[in-house]
């Protein structure tokens, strides 16, 4: 599976929607968290795809696309 700038490319199909919806979620969540916490809160979109080997060499830098294992390594 490859994370590209405009789509997720799986072996037999392509999916652009998650890469378009994730920034919308970040745009909503970041100001909400800032209002609730009273301090600036940096936000970044994360898509987690458990069970997939992910190539992010062509991925956009504003969204993190990771497998479940990659996420666990980044959080520890």
Image (tube, rainbow, N blue to C red):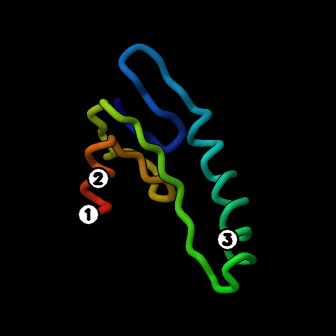
Quadrant of residue 2 within the rendered picture: top left
Q: In the displayed orientation, state which residue is furthest to the top.
A: 12
The dot on residue 33 is 3
Quarter occupied by the C terminus = bottom left
Q: Is the C-beta separation of discs 1 and 3 under 8 Å?
A: no
Q: In this orientation, which residue lies closer to the viewer: 12 or 42?
A: 42
Task: Classify 1 as above or below 65.
Answer: above
Quarter of the image holding residue 32?
A: bottom right
Label 1 CA crowd tier, 10 Å (few <14, some 14–19, many 20+) = few
Q: Where is residue 69 in the image (x, y as percent from the top left)?
A: 26, 44
- Could you say whether the residue bearing mark 3 is in a helix, strand or loop? helix
Residue at the farthest bottom position: 39
Q: How far apart are marks 2 and 1 (CA)?
A: 6 Å
Along the polypeptide, which appears first: circle 1 or circle 3? 3
Query: Which residue is disc 2 drawn over?
Result: 72
Q: Which of 8 and 51 is in front in this view?
A: 51
Q: Is mark 2 on a helix, strand or loop?
A: helix
Would you call the spot at circle 2 few (<14 residues within 10 Å), some (14-19), or many (20 or more)? few
Residue beneath label 1, please?
76
| Spatial separation of the CA atoms under disc 1 and disc 3 | 23 Å
Q: Position of residue 21 (x, y in %)?
A: 65, 43
What residue is rendered at 40% in x and 36% in y? 49
Residue 11: x and y in percent read 36, 18
Residue 42, image quadrant: bottom right
Q: Earlier in the sequence, mark 3 or mark 2?
A: 3
Residues under numbered marks 2 and 1 in contact, where contact means CB atoms less than 8 Å apart: yes
Mark 3–mark 2 contact, CB under 8 Å?
A: no
Q: In this view, does 9 lie to the left or right of 67?
A: right
């Amino acid at each position: 599976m490859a994370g590209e700038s405009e789509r997720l490319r799986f072996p037999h199909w392509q999916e652009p929607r998650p890469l378009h919806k994730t920034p919308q979620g970040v745009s909503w969540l970041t100001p909400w968290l800032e209002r609730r916490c009273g301090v600036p809160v940096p936000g970044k979109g994360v898509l987690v795809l458990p069970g997939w080997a992910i190539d992010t060499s062509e991925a956009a830098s504003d969204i993190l696309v990771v497998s479940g294992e990659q996420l666990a390594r980044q959080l520890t």
